[in-house]
Amino acid sequence: MRRTETTKLFIYIFACVILTALTGCEDDDMLDVEDIEVPDGYALSAGTSTVFKNSSFAYDTDADWVGDIPANEKRFNRGDRLYDNPLNSASGLGPVYAGYSCGSCHRNAGRTKPALWTQTGTDPAGTPVYGSGAYGFSSMLVYVTRKNGAFFQNYGRVLHDQSIYGVTAEGKLECRWHYQQFQFPDGEAYELAYPEYTIKDWYATYGDTDTPIDPKELFCTVRIPLRHVGMGQMMALDRNEIEELARKSNYPEYGISGRCNYIVERGIRQLGLSGNKAQHADLTVELGFSSDMGATNSRYPEEICEGQRQMEEGSMMGLLYDKLDVSTEDMEDVDFYLHGLGVPARRLGSAQTKVRYRGQQITDRQYVAEGEKRFYEARCHLCHVSTLHTRPRGATLLNGTELPWLGRQTIHPYSDFLLHDMGSEIMGVGLNDNYVSGLARGNEWRTTPLWGVGLQEKVNAHTCFLHDGRARNFTEAIMWHGGEGEASKNLFRQMPREDRNALIRFLESL
């Protein structure tokens, strides 16, 4: 072969290699579920973002598409540090706040046990009192409004029960629990607990009078932290599929009819997905830094206590208000961290451990499968939809960074992300908190995604469920269902005890 021909061939081969590298790099970075080796006893929950961990860090583990790409892993770790590192008055905390870091309320990316079940004293009548306490933090958000929905003068939408040294907290929450005993038809007893909230130690009176806020005018509702499981997949959901679910979510024989919540954020009307009432279109990183920690940022540049006396108190303690506390880049790193978290795989149960069910010995894995059948028999799946899909392009972070690795995934969140009326009848109140969020009325709640729920006790050492933690276990959470959940609750209620237990075992496997 002549030299010129050899040179041409070399150039041709080199060009092909370069072209392949340039056009194939994206494919090399992408994972496929067929490449995932699923261990025995597990099932994929979130496609390529599934992680196979059962430890206390099951929620706080990066997905493979993060760990396998150095740039992604570096950014994930940076966001993780910002998420967990406590703020102080020098780094942006306060003057008033609810938590001192994201991780203070979301321990291990889960839900830190709320102070609603931590006794702080006893009132003169001898009733145990729970709530904020004098110091520390309470791992909950306290919403206060007038009963007509308007805010009180000198307060915002959230009562900040904590403050930096030398600054007065806005008030302290007290909770008294009321209990009622019930029975299943087979005689097994269960108990439900309902919280009664009061506020003490208001920092200011209402308006310019000396009259404190009239409790008759006060409406108060509380939120405990959500699990940060599947946040990225939720943001990557195919919105058309969710809206199609809303059009089809009409089961008159069970009283079920879900609907979307639409809200205006950043000046755009959008489909709400995140939050207890699907009242947000994003993961609220900027709002969290602002409202929860008092850290100003480009989206919320004003202090949360702007115009209140805490501003002056903060100045006396050395706070400066001449610059933003957290950068957009840092907030997007936290956003990346949340999107990059893996979702725990479904645990199908042991194939060796034996349990007794319906008069015979079966394996735990068979028991979980029986519980799944009971889940469908109770029609839980009509709202807790097992399978959804993400859109082709994945998700986009708050500052515009795209995450294609979250695209084109089949996921199993066990939620339709729609609003459902959960009733007002149980113990005279039900789950109606009278708090309106976007289109969601007080008795409407987004279907809670169930993926990862079975590991909450291991991750956060408690089994407090529902928006305010009133349910202390799975059974109580189910029995609080009213309204559109009434039919499923009654189907569960009528089951023999062993079938109810099997359904609970299935929930523990998620």
Image (cartoon, rainbow, N blue to C red):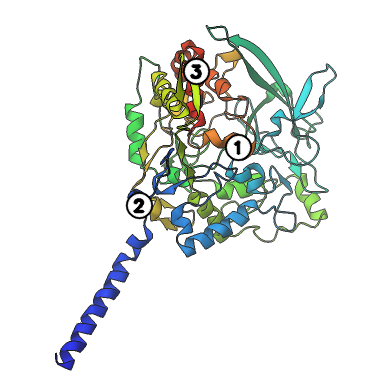
What residue is shown with label 2?
Answer: 35
In the picture, residue 415 is in which quadrant?
top left
Precedes in sequence: disc 3 or disc 1? 1
> Mark 3 sits on what residue?
500
**Residue 415 in sight here:** yes
What is the quadrant of residue 255 in the picture? top left
Compare marks 3 and 2 and give the one earlier in the sequence: 2
Secondary element type, mark 1: helix
Q: Is residue 422 visible?
A: no
Q: Tell me where residue 366 appears, x and y as whole percent.
A: 42, 26
Q: SS of the residue at dot 2?
A: helix
- How far apart marks 3 and 2 lie (CA) works out to 37 Å
Amino acid type at circle 2 is: Asp
Nearer to us in this view, 107 or 57: 57
Q: Position of residue 140 (x, y in %)?
A: 66, 36
Foreground of the two, 57 or 164: 57
Question: 340 or 42, which is in the foreground?
Answer: 42
Q: Amino acid at mark 3?
A: Arg
Crowding at mark 3 (Cα within 10 Å: few <14, some 14-19, many 20+): some
Name above or below for residue 398 compared with residue 2.
Answer: above
For the residues labelled 1 and 2, the Cα–Cα distance comes to 29 Å
Q: Which residue is mark 1?
A: 458
